[in-house]
Amino acid sequence: MSLPGGRAASAPLLGHEIEPTIFELSVAGRSAYQLRTTEIPETALSDFLPREHLKTKSVALAEVSERDLVGHFTRLSHRQFSVDLGAYPLGSCTMKYNPKFCDAVAADPGLNSVHPGVPASLSQGWLELLVSLEDKLCAITGMAAATLQPAAGAAGELTGLLLMRAYHEANGDQRTRVLIPDSAHGTNPASVTLGGYEVTTIPSNDRGLVDLDALKAALGPDVAGIMLTNPNTLGLFEEEIVEIAEAVHEVGGLLYYDGANLNAILGVIRPGDMGFDIVHMNLHKTFATPHGGGGPGAGPVAVSSRLVEFLPGPRAARREGGGYFWSTPDHSIGRVHGWHGNAMVLARALAYIDVHGGEGLTRVAQHAVLNANWLRERLRATLPAAYDRVCMHECVLTATWLKNEYGVRGLDVAKGLLEEGFHSPTVYFPLIVDEALMFEPTETESLQTLESLASSIERIAERAKTDPEGLHHAPQSTPVSRVDEARAARHLIATEDAAAR
Ligand SMILES: *Cc1c(COP(=O)(O)O)cnc(C)c1O
C-alpha cells in the first residue's frame, strides 16, 4: 500500500497525508494474533443456537500482520493532541496531566486480573480498596456514604435523581419539578428528564450567580430538589449557597451537587458542609484518568445519612472484627452498573488521592485556582472575562469584541490555538455567554506554559486584525484542517462499505 506521493505506508505521515483505514491495509490471510489451541473439542454454534440467529456472512474484519497493526495505530497516535503532549485547557472537562504512577497502579496484574464475579472471600484486597476509596471520597465531600458504581458523571446524575425520587416516594411525597440554573451543563436537564422530573430553569444574575429572588419565587411543595454546580460553570463560586440550601430544604427539596468542578475546592470546603444531600464526582476529571474521546470514567455518588438506605448495591463493606463483604442497602434503588463500576478508574483515583495526601489535595485546588486567575488577568486586554471577578479553577472569556471588530469568532481563536501547539479551550459553553472561551489550565501547568499559552492567544488576537480570513481557515498546519462540523453531523459516513458512501 502506498500513500499519496508514492511513499510507503509505514513512513511517518507528513502534513495532510491521509492514513489508510485498517480495512484498506487488509490483505487476505494475514493475522496479527492467534488464539491458543486448546484440548476442548470444538462445538458448532448451530448445535445449540437457533439457526435464524446465526450469521451467514463473514464479519469481514481487517486482516493485517502485527507489524502493520502496530504501525497503523502508532502513526495515528502521532497525529493526535494528547495530555501527554502539551497543555489541554479544556474548561469543565478538567484535562489535567495524569501521573504515570496511576497508570502503573492500574496495570498491576494483582488488580486487573481479578474477575469482577470472584467471590468476596477471594477478592478481599479489591474490596478493601473500594471501601478505602469510599471513605476518602466521603471525607473529601463531607458526606455519609457513596456508591462507586456509576460509570461517568452523567450516570451519577441519573443515579442521584433516582435516589432523590426514592427518598420522596418513601416519604409518600409526590413531587414533580427539579430546579436548574441556566448556566448548568447540558447533562443536568437531560438527567432530570430521564429521572422522570420536569426542569424549571433559574436565571443567573448580572454577577453570573443564581438569582436568589428568582429561585425563591420558583420554590414550592412540588419541588423535588435543585441541581447546582459550585463553583458553577462560569468558574464562579455561588456565594449565597447556604441561603440557597436553607430555602430549598425549607420546602422539603434536596440539594444535588454536580461535582465536575470539585478540583476547585478540594481540601478547602466540602459540599456536605454547604448543605448538599447528593454529590456526584467525576473521578476522571478530578482524580486523574485520561478521558479524551469519551474514554473510561467513574461518577461515584455520595449522599447524606438520610439517603444511605437507598444507595445502589451491592457495595463493598467492612465487617466488624475484620474483613470485607458485599452488602446491599435495605431500600436500594438497585444496580446502576453491571458489576462494581469502572474498577480501574477507581483504583487510579485512590492512588491519586493517597499519593497527594490531604495537604497535597488542598494544593491541587489552590494551584488550579491560581493558574486560572493568572490567565484571566494576563488576558484582560486580549479576551476579557465574561464576568470580571476573581474566578475559581476556570475562567470564561469572551471573543465578542473580536467578532464585532474583525469578524473573528471564538471558534476561530480556538482553531488558531491548535496551530500554536495548544489544545483548544471549551467553546460556546456555558450557553449564557456570547462567544465563550472557557479556559481551565489546571494545577499541572507551569508558569512557563501559561506564559506561552497567553502569548499564543495574544498573537492570534493580533492576527485577527490583519488576517481574519486566515483564522477562518485555521488550523492549516495540523494533519486535519478545518472541517465542516454541520456536514459531519448531517452526512455522517460511519461505514467502511464503499457502496454506502
Ligand atoms: C463533564 C460534566 C458533566 C458530565 O460528566 P461526564 O463524566 O462527562 O458524564 C456534568 N456536569 C459538568 C459541569 C461537567 O463538566
Image (cartoon, grey):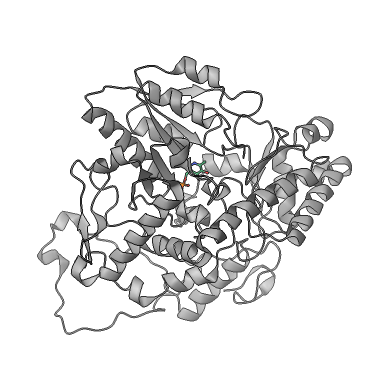
Say whether residue 199 is visible. no
**Which residue is outermost to the left?**
47
Q: Is residue 49 above or below residue 474?
A: below
446 vs 334, left or right, is right
Q: Nearer the viewer, residue 402 or 181?
A: 181
**Residue furthest out toward the front:** 321
Q: Residue at x 62, y 49 (%)?
A: 90
Residue 89 percent across, percent down from the top left: 65, 52
Depth check: give the residue in front, 352 or 185: 352
Residue 411 in the image: x percent, y percent?
69, 41
Give how far across and how far down residue 169 sits, in percent. Answer: 24, 28
Foreground residue among 160 and 134? 134
Identify the residue at image location x=28%, y=83%: 36
Q: How many marks?
A: 0
Q: Would residue 170 appear left or right of 262 to someone viewing this image?
A: left
Q: Is residue 228 positioned above or below 84 on the image?
A: above
Q: Is residue 82 visible?
A: yes
Residue 99: quadrant of the picture: bottom right
Is residue 402 shown above or below 78? above
Name the quarter where the N terminus is drawn.
bottom right
Image x and y of residue 195, in percent: 33, 33
